[in-house]
Amino acid sequence: MKKRNKIPIEELIARIHALAYNLWWAWNPRAQQIFEELSPLVWEETKHNPVAVLSQVSDAELRAYLNDREFLEMVLPVLDDFDAYMSGPKKPGTSGGKAELHRGTIAYFCAEFGLHECLNFYSGGLGILAGDHVKSASDLGLHFVAVGLFYRRGYFEQQINESGHQTEDYPPVDPAMIPVRSVRDDTGKPVVCSVMIGEEEVFFETWRIDVGRSTVYLLDTDVPENSDEVRGLTSLAYGGDVNMRVRQEIVLGIGGVRLLRSLGIRPSVFHMNEGHAAFLTLELLREEIEKSGDVVMAERSVKSRCVFTTHTPVPAGHDRFPRDLMEHTLGHHCRAMGLDMDGLMSYGNIHPDQGATEFIMTVLGLKFSRAANGVSKKHGEISSIMWKDLYPTTRRKALPIGYVTNGIHVPTWTSRRSWEFWERRNSHRWKDEFHNAGFWEHLADPEVVPDEELWSLRYTLRRDLIEFIRRKTRDGRVVGGVPGMEAILRLLSYDSLTIGFARRFAPYKRAPLLFSNLERAVNLFNDPQRPIQLVFSGKAHPRDGDGKDFIKQVTQLCDHPSLNGKIVFIVDYNINVARYMVSGCDVWLNTPRRPLEASGTSGQKIAINGGLNLSIPDGWWMEGYNGKNGWSIGKRDAVFGSPEEADRADADELYRILAEEVIPGFYDRNSDGLPKKWIARIRNSLRTIIPTFNTHRMVSEYAKKYYFPK
Ligand SMILES: *Cc1c(COP(=O)(O)O)cnc(C)c1O
């Protein structure tokens, strides 16, 4: 450590408190260590929440530790790193510092943000992607603000009852106990803004989450100015019916723009991440019409500033609102713009002249965007076909909807164990490099990281996962695990090939596909020489009956006499469970019905931990799979007569690959006990997946193609 003048302890205490309120710690394990050290119990019990930890540590106690040299030497480098990150030149990585990335402020709107397990403002992949986007935008030094909703009771916490039925709890959060802060004006009063919903003025305050150098603003209608009903408007994520949905989206879109204006933020780009936020265009339109009075010019001006990302080819995934609901909630806004209802409805319809009865949010977003994209190459093509009628003048071959393939924020998804592993084999600057292909080419070299070491990492990570599951079993949070030490010690094996399946239980993802022929499945699980085991996790949307049935099927399998102890379902999938699973599983299984997986990202998270993908060629895996870095279930151009036929063919192919390739590959050991070919596959996965499927590449691509095109 550098020689330095002694820093006053009060200043250090203040800096530790400031650190707790910036999610930079969420992707810096050494920062997390400080809080864990302060209170291992609170850290563990509050989903790794540093604000909760500090609420339990008095300044007197902190002072005592800071007088201890060892603790101080742990803290100082972290605080220095943080300061350097916040004030430093445009940050590390691929495109950091390039001028074209920094030409204006980007406002990124999304209905959910998955930033860390202690902030329950997300339901699944869309939110995780948004969270990772915000983090990379900070790393790359973009001027970036994000806007979402502050769900006081979040997305639900899952319970599974005796018969395998999912039930939902919505525990309230205390904003004072999580890393968010109220947005206040110069006089210290909360900033209050409002939107009109129907004839009612709805007020909201705002919470901010600092994520490195990015800021996420979350709007909250739970303020005393509102009626009781309106106070609850933003309390649940995807909780209510269509009436609540449209009102939440008005707050998000129209309210979000109002908030930015009241803070003096004038973005040059508005990025709508999925249709939920598309009402923002109507507020921009109102501003322009007010200025110029010319609707055509106003439309053009809005369109020149907006970009849109669509996330699903599933029709039910696109919000549609009936005309009378639109009239009831947006009539006032409409009149403020001098538009009539037909005018408004035309923005949300492909063929407005044909008597529009529904308003489609995706259509609104697309109509007011200068450019739009899907989230993988295939999904860009599918979306172009899906919405082709919106682009009648586009040449037949040209695709009106482009693509930016999703990625993950690598440091967020690197388990602490893997982090230390890669860091030990490289300088402590490894995190500046981990997006570079050359760097992984180097690390994938057996001369640099021998097979023995990679295999020992795999063992450790598998053990970490299984011990995590055993601890959760003790707490009654694992279906298929029976509490009691003796039973727990028989649950899962540290030596068995461990397959993971975790994601939202949307029916198209076909969670039970591996069990469509139960006898074949049972045989695979019970091979005495080459056993396999499976870890499930995931939530079904509260109103998705089919998804809930899948959960029931899967959890009942956990108790099947021939599968018991080999299949478990971890209750309440969240970022923490995901992190353990994507590091501990040897194989990550994904079985979507084609072409419904727009991208998927969870399989990208396992590469850095040495796991391998076994997936239907759909979404990102169409681009990621190269024949040597995992397995593809079926051919990429396969065509089926019906969904049932696809299910049968995909299941057959899955059994075949498991029996002929995956399982033998894992158990084929040399005299040192090493599966040489398996490890070679891991090396190919490291080399090919990490440098491409990360959010630094993704955000740079958004910046170059969509935010600031030449
Ligand atoms: C990564 C992640 C997802 C997205 O998973 P997909 O397989 O891409 O659908 C959903 N939920 C959590 C908690 C995740 O970490």
Image (tube, rainbow, N blue to C red):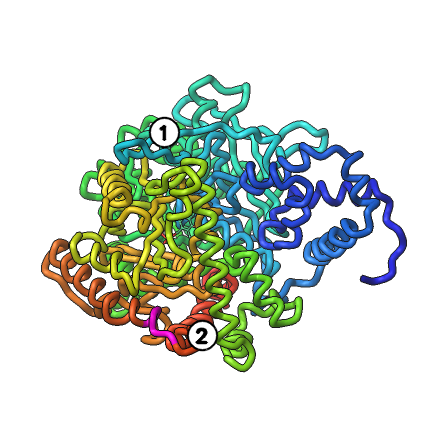
- Relative horizontal placement of residue 135, taking residue 234 as reference (left or right): right
Q: Where is residue 451 in the image (x, y as percent from the top left)?
A: 48, 75
In the depicted view, which residue is nearer to us: 564 or 59? 564
Q: Is residue 545 magenta?
A: no
Q: Which residue is at 17% across, 58% downward?
A: 520
Give the mark nearest the N terminus, 2 or 1. Answer: 1
Farthest-out residue, front: 486
Query: Which numbered dot is residue 683?
Result: 2
**Does 261 sit above or below residue 223?**
below
Q: Residue at x 32, y 75 (%)?
A: 627
- Residue 135 sits in quarter: bottom right
Residue that lies at the very extreme toward the top in this rendered image: 227
Q: In the image, what residue occupies the spot 15% across and 59% down?
A: 646
**Magenta region: which residues?**
665-669
Q: Residues within 10 Å of mark 2 (few under 14, many from 20)?
A: many
Instruction: From the viewer's perspective, tell me whether residue 636 is left or right of residue 690.
Output: left
Looking at the rendered structure, the secondary structure element under dot 2 is helix
Q: What element carries label 1?
A: helix
Task: Tell me the distance, in whole angstroms, between the alpha carbons under discs 2 and 1.
Answer: 49 Å
Tell me residue 456's x, y (percent): 50, 67
- Looking at numbered disc 1 in the image, what kind of residue is underneath it? Met
- Which of the pair 412/182 is nearer the observer? 412
- Relative image position of residue 30 (x, y in whole percent): 66, 54
The secondary structure making up most of the magenta span is: helix
Q: In the rendered image, which quarter is residue 247 located in?
A: top left
For disc 1, the neighbor class at 10 Å (few under 14, some 14 to 19, many from 20) is some
Residue type at the position of mark 2: Arg
**Picture disc at residue 244:** 1
- Check the image and name the residue furthest to the right: 5
Quarter-wise, where is residue 210 in the image? top right
